[in-house]
Image (cartoon, rainbow, N blue to C red):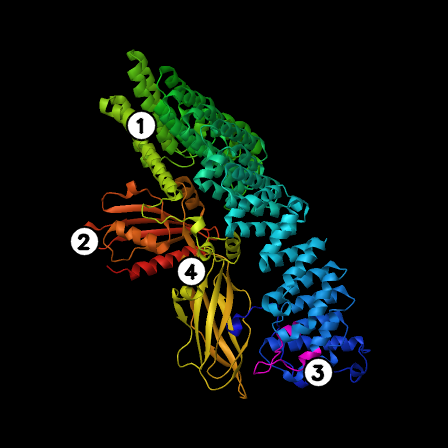
Amino acid sequence: MTAAENVCYTLINVPMDSEPPSEISLKNDLGNCGMSALLTSFPPVEKGDVKLKTEALKKVIIMILNGEKLPGLLMTIIRFVLPLQDHTIKKLLLVFWEIVPKTTPDGRLLQEMILVCDAYRKDLQHPNEFIRGSTLRFLCKLKEAELLEPLMPAIRACLEHRHSYVRRNAVLAIYTIYRNFEHLIPDAPELIHDFLVNEKDASCKRNAFMMLIHADQDRALDYLSTCIDQVQTFGDILQLVIVELIYKVCHANPSERARFIRCIYNLLQSSSPAVKYEAAGTLVTLSSAPTAIKAAAQCYIDLIIKESDNNVKLIVLDRLIELKEHPSHERVLQDLVMDILRVLSTPDLEVRKKTLQLALDLVSSRNVEELVIVLKKEVIKTNNVTEHEDTDKYRQLLVRTLHSCSVRFPDMAANVIPVLMEFLSDNNEAAAADVLEFVREAIQRFDNLRPLIVEKMLEVFHAIKSVKIYRGALWILGEYCSTKEDIQSVMTEVRRSLGEIPIVESEIKKEAGELKPEEEVSVGPAQKLVTEMGTYATQSALSSSRPAKKEEDRPPLRGFLLDGDFFVAASLATTLTKIALRYVSLVQEKKKQNSFNAEAMLLMATILHLGKSSLPKKPITDDDVDRISLCLKVLSECSPLMNDIFNKECRQSLSHMLSAKLEEEKLSQKKESEKRNVTIQPDDPISFMQLTAKNEMSSKEDQFQLSLLAAMGNTQRKEAADPLASKLNKVVTQLTGFSDPVYAEAYVHVNQYDIVLDVLVVNQTSDTLQNCTLELATLGDLKLVEKPSPLTLAPHDFANIKANVKVASTENGIIFGNVVYDVSGAASDRNCVVLSDIHIDIMDYIQPASCTDAEFRQMWAEFEWENKVTVNTNIIDLNEYLQHILKSTNMKCLTPEKALSGYCGFMAANLYARSIFGEDALANVSIEKPIHLGPEAPVTGHIRIRAKSQGMALSLGDKINLSQKKTSL
């Protein structure tokens, strides 16, 4: 292990602004109290002297940390500083003795250390408990047995001190010494066991028990056996250690499970949330019995409900989700669905989202009815609460969950639909759109519910506020109204929503009727009005000062049309055509047929007339004119072919789309279940626990070790167990040239939220390089956590320097810098070697993800940064190019495979990914094969990237540009 990789105990912030003081000035500052320090053991030092010595000692510590040796100061500090009783001096001395070299070059202990040892023996007998305790903590860091040996009696005596702070640190000191130098205190386990039996303080008992776990597990078990019935009365810090011991014992020796499982059950009732969490996790690993799983899950649910921290809630929810992944545990959790739904009382959206997903995964025919009742209550609650920013999103989640329940359990649809239909008139368009999608699927799949849905739709039709929802509702009514009464009801609702016709004439009359009184009252001030554009308003603006009231009184459809939204008019024309053709087939009387057709045609004609007039804010588009004209022609001719197209093939298209969607969902569910089901091949070896060797037993996953690795950021990196193997897998980045005086190269380790640079620095000169410092700077959303410490490099010596860089967002970054150093004995200025740039790739932070089409469209509309990349490649196949882009960008294709299958010369696909920071990246690939250029012509087209941040959109575009240029056939 190199000096740079030694374990560091004390971190000190080093200000590098001023010049380092000389050894002589430091010696003067440290010995400034003259001979008085030698004459008495408690020198009468003035306060100013103590302050001066404190500052000098701090400078000495910083210089030693920077690589200076300063051997001449050792005796000065022993003579003039060590005898002082000032607490700040004593704390600094602990740091000083930790870092100062204590041995000669040949490895023998310095003679001066005997004096230091005697001083610390006195501190271990000091009447102040803080000095005793901090000295004991310092002794944990000593690695010299010769220094520790004379102190052993004093350390043992500290176990009987009156103050718990001293006793608990004495246990830690004994444990560390026993672990490093067992011969100094061979009876440590027995000593600590006796101490534990008689000890009353919780923190002391915890430290003692922790030592026994690691030093002598049998003694720890003996102690636990004597007090196993009182465990629930212990303090939480001791209970946590007991849980760890039980886990380790049962992990190594499964036959002990029956002995301790009752103790773990009792700890589930602990008052400490941490103990309950660990006990539940341990119980799950020790037993797979349904009662154990149920108790652990119940404990997790209670923790989620009672804990106020949302992060804790999410962590515990993840543990519940992990439990559900096990096939045998899923059945047990299904009985707890109603308890899980209690978590919905949490206002945090992320917690609610995970809870609803978990409940949906666990729902079965036994509990679906109760689940639907709870969700209906929650939906009604969201309607009554005051609007919160997450209320609308929560309502959407509830609607989608009810939608999924109804699709999986058709019997529930009749209960759900009446409640959800009320939300079609909701101000939140997204929630209403989800309801509409659900209603469309339900009315197509469940024939028996069609009358109910049509009836409810007609009830809420006039209250719909959003034009998008209005269009969808019109389509559903036009498609599924099959009786004469329903068709007439639809026509009545349309007439009611359209208002008085002809529209143009009635609007002109209204304007003319209301203009005169306005003129009399408001002619004067009219000329002083200024518009938003900064121009003066003329008298014609007077008529527009009143419409606010008129718009409130307008029927909804008329309002949409006067706002210039004629797409809804095209949808209305299609609906009127469908119901008119169906009415003709249902009613035999010619007069009634003609009357109905004429009314429908009149409505279309008046809308066309309105579109061509100057009344709407925007004129009608040519597409909408064509659509309405086509519908007029169809109604005037009434041909059987058109009847089939409007009334049969439209519904078949919907049916095909829904069946394809259902098939896709089943396929994804099948893949998920295949992942979860552990398949065992016929020739796989069978492992018998009784025949397993001890070294193989240790290879089983230790949950405590896994959680430690997760905290260190080593999850999902199995090669991290062998650092050499993991280094061999990485590319070395050369930072300087081979002819430079200092050669540098780096391994770049990318963790989840930070980058660790492991830089090898080699002195290629015959001189000693002092204060050799790696100076780094970053470009992009990267931040250097701490400045690497300076080193002293002997001739042709080398050292490893580690630097941490914090990553804040997903975008390409650059790390650049230089190595500066002083040549020993030279009078010249500092030397500098500039390093090559290290480029951080965005792909390390992007992961494939999925979202619904509606979410994709919503994000596409919201995201403001777009990057358009022109396809420039030598790939000649459309599918091959798409796969290449997916592989290069880590994105997932949201467009179903069926939509991409076949060959028609062009392709469009939506891609989606999410960064580890929760940022979304969207891409739309629009490519074609230019057939006129021959079969070998490369793919052409564009890729549009959208993201919330500019950096992500640009970085992703650069990555695509780079990867498509590198492609070779």
- Using a 10 Å C-alpha cutoff, classify the residue at mark 2 as few (fewer than 14 neighbours), some (14 to 19) or many (20 or more): few
The residue at which mark 4 appears reads as 719
Instruction: Say whether residue 112 is left or right of residue 903.
Output: right
Look at the numbered disc 3 and give the secondary structure of its residue: helix
The label nearer to you, 1 versus 2, is 1
Residue at screen point 75% across, 82% down: 32
Quadrant of the snapshot with the C terminus: bottom left
* Residues drawn in magenta: 95-115
Look at the numbered disc 2 and give the secondary structure of its residue: helix
The residue at which mark 3 appears reads as 76
Find the distance from the CA under tag 4 to the CA under tag 2: 49 Å
Counting residues from the start of the chain, the first of labels 3 and 1 encountered is 3
Find the distance from the CA under tag 4 to the CA under tag 1: 55 Å
The residue at which mark 2 appears reads as 933
Counting residues from the start of the chain, the first of labels 3 and 2 encountered is 3
Q: What residue type is labelled 2?
A: Leu
Counting residues from the start of the chain, the first of labels 4 and 3 encountered is 3
Instruction: Report if residue 96 lies within the magenta region.
Output: yes
Where is residue 803? Give x, y as percent: 51, 68
Q: Please, is residue 606 above or below residue 285 in the view? A: above
| Pointer 1 with pointer 2, Cβ within 8 A | no
The label nearer to you, 3 versus 2, is 3
In the rendered structure, find residue 613 and report the number of the disc placed on it.
none
Find the distance from the CA under tag 3 to the CA under tag 1: 97 Å
The label nearer to you, 3 versus 1, is 3
Where is residue 136? Give x, y as percent: 69, 66
